[in-house]
Image: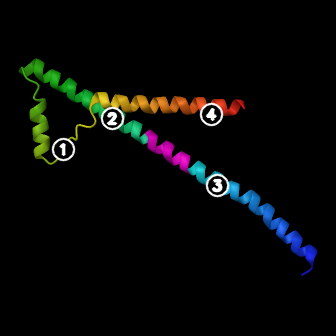
Amino acid sequence: MSDSIMIALIESTGSTLAVLIPSLAALYLSRRWFHVKRLEDSYESALRDIQYLLTVESVHCELHKENHGQSWRLKARHIANNQGVFWSQRNTYSLTQKHLDKLEYRKKSSRRLRRFALKD
């Protein structure tokens, strides 16, 4: 091969790689960002479900207390424990609210950062 063909081949390979490498990196990072976003949305949904179930338990116990004089909350939890289902007590209503507040703060701060980046 002549020198001019070899130079042209090297230049075209270099320019192709110069376009390909950042494109692949952007693809990888965007997929990763969407995966993290999907996990955060699932986590938020799970926390809201936990809050809902704790609220339902509280309302149910109040109704029992009004009708029968006692809430039976501990008895119901004891029966659930005997069936092999245990509550870690790491997800109380107040703790789930703290986690939801943190998620909301992260969403707001990431929106502000995007808005700031777009201004430049």
Look at the image and give the residue range highlighted in magenta: 32-41
Residue 13 percent across, percent down from the top left = 79, 67
What residue appears at the point 55 percent right and 46 percent down from the top-left corner? 33
What residue appears at the point 12 percent right and 23 percent down from the top-left corner? 64
Q: CA distance from mark 4 to mark 2?
A: 30 Å
Q: Quadrant of residue 12?
A: bottom right
Residue 112 percent across, percent down from the top left = 59, 29
Residue receiving disc 3: 25
Q: Report the front residue among 49 and 119.
A: 119
Residue receiving disc 1: 86
Q: CA distance from mark 3 to mark 1?
A: 44 Å
As helix, strand or loop, the secondary structure at mark 3 comes to helix
Compared across the picture, whether 3 is left or right of 61 comes to: right
Looking at the image, tell me whether mark 2 or mark 1 is earlier in sequence order: 2
Amino acid at circle 2: Asp
Q: CA distance from mark 3 to mark 4?
A: 19 Å
User: Mark 2 touching mark 1, by CB under 8 A?
Assistant: no
Q: Report the front residue among 98 and 84.
A: 98
- Picture disc at residue 108: none
Residue receiving disc 4: 114
Q: CA distance from mark 2 to mark 3?
A: 36 Å
Q: Is residue 37 magenta?
A: yes
**Front of the two marks 2 and 1:** 1
Q: Is disc 4 surrounded by few (<14), some (14 to 19) or many (20+) residues within 10 Å?
A: few
